[in-house]
Image (cartoon, rainbow, N blue to C red):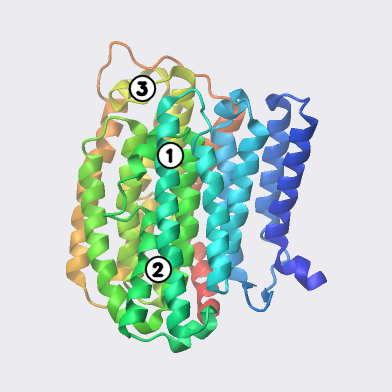
Amino acid sequence: MSDFFLIMKQELAVTAIIFFLLIVKIAGKSKNVEWLPWIQLLLLLNFIGGFFFIQSGTLFADMYHTNGLLAFQKNILSLGVYLISLLCSDWLKKSEHLPEFFLLMCSSLLGMFFLISSGNLLMFYLSLELASIPVAAMANFDLHKKSTSEGALKLILISAFASAVLLFGISLIYGATGTISFASLSQVVTDSPLQMLAFVFFFTAFTFKLSVVPFHLWTADVYEGAPIATTSYLSVISKGAVAFIFITVLYKVFAPLEAVWYWMLVVLSVLTMLIGNLFALRQQNIKRFLAFSSIAQVGFILVAITGTGVDSMASVTYFILIYVFSNLAAFGVAAIISEKTGKENIDEYKGLYKTNPFLSWMLAIALFSLAGIPPTAGFFGKLFLLTAGSVKGNFWLILIAGLNMVISLFYYLKIVRAVFMDKNENPVEKVLVNGYAKMGLVICAAGIILAGLIGPLYDYIRELITYFFN
C-alpha cells in the first residue's frame, strides 16, 4: 500500500485538491479574494511535492507506470498551472465561479498526469478524454461573451472529431494486433496495410491536439474567444502533455514504423513552421498572434522528434519547460492589460513602455525567448531542438527551420518595437499589477534567464531520459 501511494502521489495530490475545491464550492460562503491564496498555496505545494519521494513502478496490470522522467514532466505541468493561477489572478478574483474553474483545470491536469503515465491504449484514451472535456467548459467560462461560446463550440466539435478518429485508430490497432498494451505493441507492430491505416488515424488525432498544420484551423478562434487563463492552459499545459506522450509513443511503441512517421513528421514540421509564421505576421489581436506563434513553435518540436530517441526527447522536454516560462509570461502580460483596460489589439500596445515599463520589459523578455534570441533560454531550447533534428543528416530541414526562425524574428520584434519605440497619442494607461501577477511574471522572467544559463539542468533531463530508454 505504501508503494501505491508513492507511485501515484502526484495524481493523489491533485485529487485531494479537487476534493478540497468541491468542499469550497459546497460551503460557498467565502469570497474569491479569500479562497484564491489558499488555492494558489495548494498548487504550489503540489508542484514542490512532486520533487520528493519519487518512485518508479507500475500499477493496474501495467496500465499505469511512472519513473523519474515522467514525474519531472508532470512537475513541469504543475508549475504551469501554478503560474496561471498567479498571472490571471485579476480575472480569477472577478469570476463568479472561481472554485469551478480550478476544479475543471485540476481535473484536466489529473487527466494529463494519467495520460503521461499510460501503459496501454485504453488508459491512454480515457486519460485523454479526462484531460480534454474540462477544457471545453473552461473555454466557455465567460458566459456573457458571444465569442467565448463560439470558440468553446469549435473546441468541442474539433475535440469530439479528434477523439472519434483516435478511437477508430485504436480499434483498428487492436483488431490488427490483438493487444492494447504499449509494451506488447512495440513487439508486434508491422507495416501491414491495416496497421499502417490504424497508425495514420492514431497519428492524426495527435496532430489535432497539437494544432499541427493542416489540423490547426480551430486554434486561433478558440484562443481569441476563450478567457486568457484558458488560452494559457491550452497553449502550454495541454500541448506540453500531448507532446510528452506523443514522442514517447512514437519511440517506445511505434518504433518499427519509424521509416513511415519520420517522413510524415518532416513534411508536417515544414508546413507547420511556415504557415504558423506567415499567419502570425498578419495578426492584430494579441491572442490570435500568440496562437499562430504557438503553432510555429510546435513545428520546431516536430523537427526535434525526427531525430533519435534520447537527444530528441531531452531537447523536447527542455524546450517545453522553457516554453512554459516564455509563453505564460507573454500571456500573463496580455491578461493583465486585457483585464484592466479591455485592450487586446497589438496596435494598442504602442508606447506601452512610457506608462508601464515593468510590463513592457516582461513582455520583451518573453518575446525574445520565443524568438530564440540569446542569452534567453529560448535560444538554447531551439538550439537543442535543431541539433537533435540534425542527427540523421537532414540539414535541408534544419536550414528551413533556421529560415523560419528569421521570419519569426520579424513579428516578435515588431511587437517589441511597438512597445518601446512607436509613438501613441493614447497609450495604455498606467496599470496596477497586483502582487500575485507580479510574482508570476518575475518567476517567468527568472526562469527564462536562468534555465538557459544553468547547464546541469539539461544534463539532468538527459540523464532521466537515458534511464527511461534503458
| Residue 326 badge | none
409 w.r.t. 24: above or below: below
User: Which circle's residue, 1 or 2, is located before the other in the chain?
Assistant: 1
Q: Quadrant of residue 258?
A: bottom left
User: Which residue is rendered at x = 71% and y = 44% of the image?
Assistant: 42
Q: Residues within 10 Å of mark 3 (few under 14, many from 20)?
A: many
Crowd tier of the residue under label 1, counting other residues whose Cα lies within 10 Å: few below 14, some 14–19, many 20 or above: some
- Label 2: how many residues lie within 10 Å, few (<14), some (14-19) or many (20+)? many
Residue that label 3 marks: 352
**Secondary structure found at label 1:** helix
Amino acid marked by disc 1? Leu
Helix, strand or loop for disc 2? helix
Numbered badge on residue 153: 1
Between disc 1 and disc 3, whose residue precedes? 1
Q: Position of residue 317 (x, y in %)?
A: 46, 62
Q: What is the spatial separation of the Cα atoms under label 2 and label 3, in whole angstroms? A: 45 Å
Q: Which residue type does callout 3 highlight?
A: Leu
Closer to us: 168 or 50: 168
Residue 294, how many percent across, how many down? 35, 48
- List x then y, in percent, for residue 277: 24, 47
Q: Which numbered disc, 1 or 3, marks the residue closer to the eye?
A: 1
Q: Give the side of residue 401 with respect to residue 254, left or right.
A: left
Q: Which mark is residue 202?
A: 2
